[in-house]
Structure formats: structure tokens, C-alpha cells
Amino acid sequence: MALVGFCGSRSFPASFAPLVSRVVCSVLSSRRSLAVGCCVGADASVLGAVLAAGVAPRLSVFAAFGPISPPWPARYVSAPGASSSVSAVSGVAGALTAGASVSWWAGGGPSVPLAGRLASRSSALVSAVAASGAGRGFVGFVSSPCPVGLSPSLSPSVCFPGSGSGSWSSLALAAGLGLPVVVFPVPPSGYRPSPDLPASWPGSWVRLVGA
């Protein structure tokens, strides 16, 4: 089964949620499955779109924290290793209850610092997509330009140098592993122009029809 992975900014503008829903529905209509991380922002928007479509069993979630407690639904939920400002605990809990597959501690155990866990979780997500069937790909919703010097590589350590944009790092690893990548600039309200696509990357960028 082909997987399409998703990543994006934690400061994802809510005004772009309808775009995420359209992209998610497009992937679902092609009979492919989805994979996403565990953070607020774009990840949470993807989780919400999948739940709204009623197809959580076709979703794989890569979480940088441990199993959620108490069992969902509950007024408040928590998870070991989660961050109140970064982790979409409730969104992951809802997806799990609806039938999604969740990989807990996907970036390493609680002894690994959060930043390292997030990077390793993203690397695990990209690698899982790359190992899936024909039709696989990777989608990013980016709110800032690609960091200077970041380019596609087969090496997670090269793509995740410990600074910069996790979304662009995920896209760089995906491209390095040979995945087709689709990038949607989602600039913050009032910010123009939209984030530039990196001209230095191998291959070429093609504008999507109707995008």
C-alpha cells in the first residue's frame, strides 16, 4: 500500500485548513494511505481532516511521545514526553480511538531530548513512506523559506542538522530518498511573498494545476 506522508509548520495558519482538507481528500480518493507526525499546526490539521473524512484506519501517526492516558475520550488527556506547546495530544488520541495506527516514541524514548525526538520521529516517518508501495510521496505545508545550505540527502543527520526548519528537513530527506515532494507555501497572515521554493535542489518544481 502506498503511503503519502505529510509535514508542516507548527505555526500553521488556520486559514489554510481548507487547503489541507482538499489535499487529504485528494490522496484518499486515490486509494492511498496517509502518514503524519504528532505536532500542533499542520500535523493537527491533517489529523482533523482525516477524522472528518471518517477514514482514520488509513492513517499512520508517528508520535514523539508515549501512550496516552487516560483512555480517550476524556476531558483531559496526557502523554509521557509530550510538550504542552508542541504536541497535539488530543488530536492523536482522537485518531487512535477512531482506528489510526500510532507509533509511540517514534523518535526515541524519554531520555532523548524533545528536539532530538522530533527530528528522529520525522526521519522515521519519511523512511516509512519511502519503504511503501508505488504511488508514495510526501507533502509539506511550509510557512518559511528553506534554510540556506539545506539540500536533499540520503542521510538523516545531514537533513536534520539540529537547527532550522523541521518541515524542510523532512522534505529534503524525502527528496533525497527519491520521493516526489509537493510543497504548499502557507505564509502567515499579512506576510508576502510566499516562501520561495529552493532553486538549488536537484530536479525541477512544477506548479500544480489549479493550485
Image: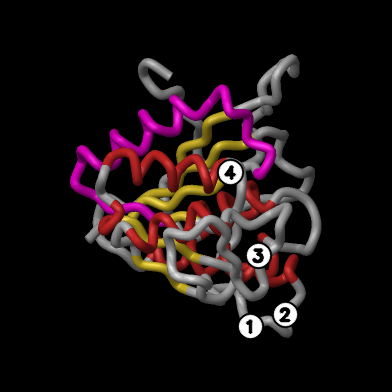
Question: From this viewpoint, is residue 155 visible?
Answer: no
Q: Amino acid at mark 3?
A: Leu
Pick whichever of labels 4 and 2 is earlier in the sequence.
Answer: 4
Find disc 1 in the rendering and name its residue: 109
Q: Is residue 83 visible?
A: yes
Three-letter code for the amino acid on which mark 4 is drawn: Gly
First along the sequence among labels 3 and 4: 4
Mark 1 or mark 4: name the one nearer the start of the chain. Answer: 4
Q: Which residues are magenta?
A: 10-35
Q: Which mark is residue 118?
A: 3
Q: Which residue is mark 4?
A: 8
Q: CA distance from mark 2 to mark 3?
A: 10 Å
SS class, disc 4: strand
Residue appearing at x 62%, y 68% in the figure: 156
Q: Which element is circle 1 on?
A: loop
Q: Are marks 1 and 2 in contact (CB under 8 Å)?
A: yes
Q: Which of the labelled discs sits on residue 112, or is there none?
A: 2
Categorize mark 2 by other alpha carbons within 10 Å: few (<14), some (14-19), many (20+): some
Q: Where is 66 relative to 178, above or below?
A: below
- Marks 1/2: CA–CA distance: 6 Å
How far apart are labels 3 and 4 at the CA level? 13 Å
Q: Quadrant of the C terminus?
A: top left
Residue, x 72% and y 71% (percent of image)? 116
Q: Name the image quarter holding residue 28.
A: top left
Local crowd size for mark 1, using a 10 Å CA cut-off: few (<14), some (14–19), many (≥20): some
- Residue 34: x percent and y percent? 35, 52
